[in-house]
Image (cartoon, rainbow, N blue to C red):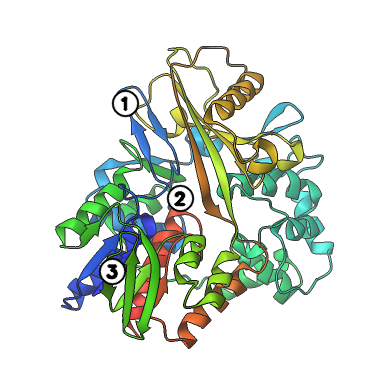
Amino acid sequence: MAAILGGGLGGLSTGYYLLKNNISNNNNLKLFLLEATDYCGGWIKSIKTKDYIFEQGPRTIRPRGAIGLNTLNMLQDLGLSEHIAAIKPDHPAARNRMIYVNNTLYSLPSSLKGVFQKNEPFSKPLIYAAFNDLKQPQKELKDDSIYNFVERRFGKEIADYAISPMICGICAGDAKEISVKFLMKTLFEYEQNYGGVIKGVVKSMLKGKNEESLELSELAKRAQEEKWSIYTIKGGLETFPAAMKQYLKDNNVDLYLNTKVEEIDFVDSSMVRLKKTNGESMTATHIYSSVPSHILSKLVIKQHPQLSELLSEIPFVTVGIVNLYFASDKPLIEPAFGFLVPPIENSPILGVVFDSCCIPDQKGTVLTVMLGGRWFNEKFGADVTKERLYEIAMKEIKSILKIQDKVAAFNVSILNKCIPQYVIGHYDRVNRIREYIQNKNLPISLVGSSYDGVGINDVIYSAKTQVERDVTK
């Protein structure tokens, strides 16, 4: 009997892939899932009305690469193909992405032609960044921050105005702390192996691509053929984990909601006891932990303080989310995905997503303001109220987008410690965590955003690869 700890996307995906393996191999492995709250889906939560959808967490998914196509395979298998809303390259949400610098919104180049043109706030055409890389010497490093790497290879402006805001948008983090391997592992390896990024790109092209083979569903093939930029799910992204939860229930996985675990007791290499806060216990032959590493750290501290310490060293950040709905029939914004604010601007907000452009079936204008992240406590303090975050968000919206209309509806969420930060040395730390588990022969596997990537695709793929790895042992 296997236990899954956590009913977020990682836990649900683990259950999905364990079931798939059971079915394909005619196994009779019994599964149960424990979730501390009354909801399965983690940070993916949608508030839906007849006029608007407020996404309190992720809202879109990228279809690129093996991990992106893998998610599309799952979506088709769950019967959600007809619910997909694709955004293709000619859509404003794909073409128009902005940054806010010096009290002005600037559009980032979205075509090859734009790379050869001067686009403010950059002082030179972006092609000059490639020349900078060619003339820079090699610097041998084991790891580096993504900011340092980009500044060294492509210049300070690219680091400040392109990469830093992008890191804010992806993980609400500081590019000066986040490992280059988080987003640019291949480019970093080009520098280390070939002396530069451009040199590495050329040599890899000469070698030819070595992509992972993946059998594609019709939905994944369509995404490739139509070159989707991003996509979402009609009716809210919450539809996705809801379908996964139903799949688990339909296949006799026992779901225990509102069930908190306070300690994990590893009896031996084939038995683990989960001690619940109500004094009861449950046993399993193996456990898949999808809960955040800082939570798992507390559950194993009695038996394995060294493992607990390693887990606790992965930092997390808190993000404020303010969803806004303006009922006006006239458009209040130019069609675009939204804008991000570089940390160098010292703004209280990370950026704004134009949901009424990205998400279908929205009336009026729908915006989501993201606040805090790496700088949450610094800017707002630990005891900031939702009312205060709403006031700050509205002030910035009025100032930047010049919107004076009255808000028809809003929602404020404070997502406490919601995104792990892959700071310099993260991947070595994760390797040490997994080596400890292997050396001690502990019956536990780790999945989820704490370890192998923070995006939806990453979390799903993490579950898939971990299940496959365990099956082949």
Residue 226: percent from the left, percent from the top?
A: 39, 47
Sequence-first tag of 1 and 2? 1
Circle 1 sits on which residue?
49
Say what amino acid the circle numbered 3 marks: Ser
Q: Nearer the viewer, mark 3 or mark 2?
A: 3
Residue type of the residue flagged with mark 1: Thr
Q: Which residue is mark 2?
A: 62
Q: Position of residue 423 (x, y in %)?
A: 65, 61
Q: Which residue is mark 3?
A: 281
Does residue 447 appear in the picture of this structure?
yes
Q: Can you tell which of label 1 and label 3 is closer to the viewer? A: 3
Residue drawn at x 47%, y 78% as measured from the top left: 303
Q: CA distance from mark 1 to mark 3?
A: 41 Å
In the picture provided, is 252 more to the left or to the right than 158? left
200, 269: nearer the viewer: 269
Q: Earlier in the sequence, mark 1 or mark 3?
A: 1
Q: Quadrant of the C terminus?
A: bottom left
In this figure, what is the number of numbered marks?
3
Question: From where the camera sits, is residue 215 visible?
Answer: no
Quadrant of image for the N terminus:
bottom left
